[in-house]
Amino acid sequence: MKNTIKKYITPIVCSVVLAITVSSCSKDNYYQDGGLANPKFNGTVMQYLQSNPKFDTIAQIVKLAGMENIFSKEDITFFAPTDETIRRTIGIVNGKIAALQGGLNQQLFDLKKDTIKQLSDIPQQTWRKYLMRYVFKGKFLLKDYPQLDFSLRPLYPGGYYYGYNGDLANIGVVYGTSNTVKYAGYRQLCIAAITDQSNPQFYYNGSAAVASSDIQPTNGVVHALAVYVASFSIGIRNPDGTTTIITSNPNLTGELFVNATMQNIFGFSYEFDNEVILNR
């Protein structure tokens, strides 16, 4: 089953960072999705990641984190960031591609520290700590999660779930509007990391949207996270000499509470960057 974002913009073009080969298809929507989802996959979660070019780097990180047995033998639900998330998190130094500016390598360079040249430069315990934020014990499909309405959270708060290493997350399904009828539209699965467990309703980092849900390997469920593409404005020259400004704007409906920055950062927050920097 595939959940899609209903509004469209022009594609962006992705390049390769480090020694990571990322095959990222450009899509004309606000989120780059995780690919067409065949609900059933005849193999483990680990094998699914290895078989899909959008998750080549994530599969490497699973191994570097020492979690291959978990992804191969245990029943898990994995909210899978794509390789593009890693690419944007690490970024490049003094680059001109907006999506890659200000990343981990730029911060390290500015601090006169060694940059990340290969994934193994980051300690195993760091990869493991933040990868576990995306992993939950048991198999959970979209239908298993409660409704989430960001504007009516007292009534539809979603659900709170502990990740594999005890991190708290809010997960729920946003019911979209169709033809002005509330809750009659698309279904969008969302996940938010709760960094302050004493105040779980506070989404400091916003929520991340799922692009393709309910991918079902033999030992679990994979929900592929979307990659957020920023809004833009363009000017179209009219025959009479005037200019019409067209602005694309994600979340026109206000139904999704997505943090454009944190959606694309590994671990849902800058804590990952800070931990790597302290270890360099």
Image (cartoon, rainbow, N blue to C red):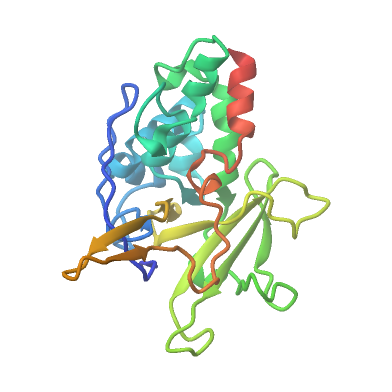
Residue lying furthest right in this view? 198
Residue 54, image quadrant: top left
Residue at 34% over, 64% down: 245
In which quadrant of the rendered image does the C terminus lie?
top right
- Residue 1 lies, in percent from the top left, at 36, 68
The answer to which image quadrant residue 87 occupies is top left
In the image, 145 versus 74, the foreground residue is 145
Give above or below for 3 relative to 99. below
Q: Which one is nearer the viewer's eye here, 109 or 216?
A: 109
Q: Residue at x 49, y 50 (%)?
A: 78
Query: Is 230 left, or right, of 14 in this rendering?
Result: right
Taking the spot 61% from the left edge, 40% from the top edge, the residue there is 269
Residue positioned 39% across, 30% down in the render: 60
**151 shown above or below 127:** below
- Left or right of 44? Residue 106 is right
**Which residue ends up furthest to the left in the rendered image?**
239
Q: Residue furthest front?
A: 241
| Vertical side of 245 occupied by 269: above or below | above
